[in-house]
Image (cartoon, rainbow, N blue to C red):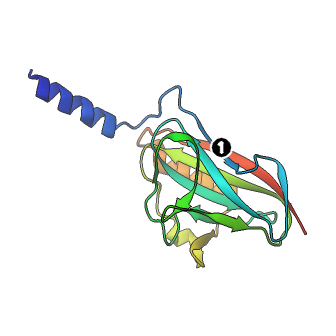
Amino acid sequence: MTLRFILISLLLLAVNKSVLSAEYNASITTHLGNNKTFHAGDKFSLLISLSETSSALIIYETAENDLIQIFPNYNLSETLLPSGEYYPLTWNKDVMWFTVSAPFGTERIWLFTATKPFPNLNDFSQKVGVYYRLKLSLEQLKQKLNRHFIGAEINLHVVHAQINTAP
């Protein structure tokens, strides 16, 4: 075996990896941290931390349990997020800011990560601006994602941040 063949084989293994490492870590938070209270009109940004480059799906769960897919979205079709410590979610190199509005209450931002792309959810969503409102419950979404990845033996990693919103 030549050195070139070995290096190419190792590179292919790294690119086609289907399982996140045992040390894999992912988290999502706002620029002010988790469990913070934001009032109508306040703006917040999201910070992501990934120990490995991963495909990602970010879902905003409103106080009324509506699910809004904020990443990928109409303007951002690429699902791959790089590894790094708490970097802001951006669009065209600008930080994405979200403005608080009704309904108010406890809300969650879900970060789903995997080593392979997520299924297209267009059949289960409605475009709202640049985002997509999912026509699924959180439990239905988790089941759909688990079914998508189970045959491919791909790890699905799920974390969330929680915020409180008020008038």
Is 8 situated above or below 68? above
Residue 19 image position (x, y, % from top left): 44, 34
Q: Residue furthest right?
A: 167
Q: Nearer the viewer, residue 25 or 41?
A: 41
Report the quarter where the C terminus lies: bottom right
Query: Can see residue 139?
Result: no
Q: Nearer the viewer, residue 159 or 37?
A: 37
Indicate the quadrant where residue 131 lies.
Answer: bottom right
Indicate the quadrant where residue 153 lies.
Answer: top left
Q: Residue furthest top?
A: 1
Q: Is residue 120 left or right of residue 134?
A: left
Q: How many marks?
A: 1
Residue 130 image position (x, y, % from top left): 56, 74
Is 148 situated above or below 53? below
Residue 136 image position (x, y, % from top left): 65, 64
Q: Nearer the viewer, residue 89 or 160?
A: 89
Q: Is residue 5 left or right of residue 43?
A: left
Q: Residue at position x 59%, y 71% from top?
A: 132
Residue 22 image position (x, y, % from top left): 51, 26
Q: Residue furthest front?
A: 94
Query: Can see residue 127?
Result: yes
Residue linked to disc 1:
159
Residue type at the position of mark 1: Val
For label 1, count other residues whose C-alpha is less than 10 Å away and answer few (under 14), some (14-19) or many (20+).
some
Q: Residue at position x 47%, y 29% from top?
A: 21
Query: The residue tagged with tag 1: helix, strand or loop?
Result: strand
Report the quarter where the N terminus lies: top left
Is 84 situated above or below 6? below
Q: Residue at position x 36%, y 36% from top?
A: 17
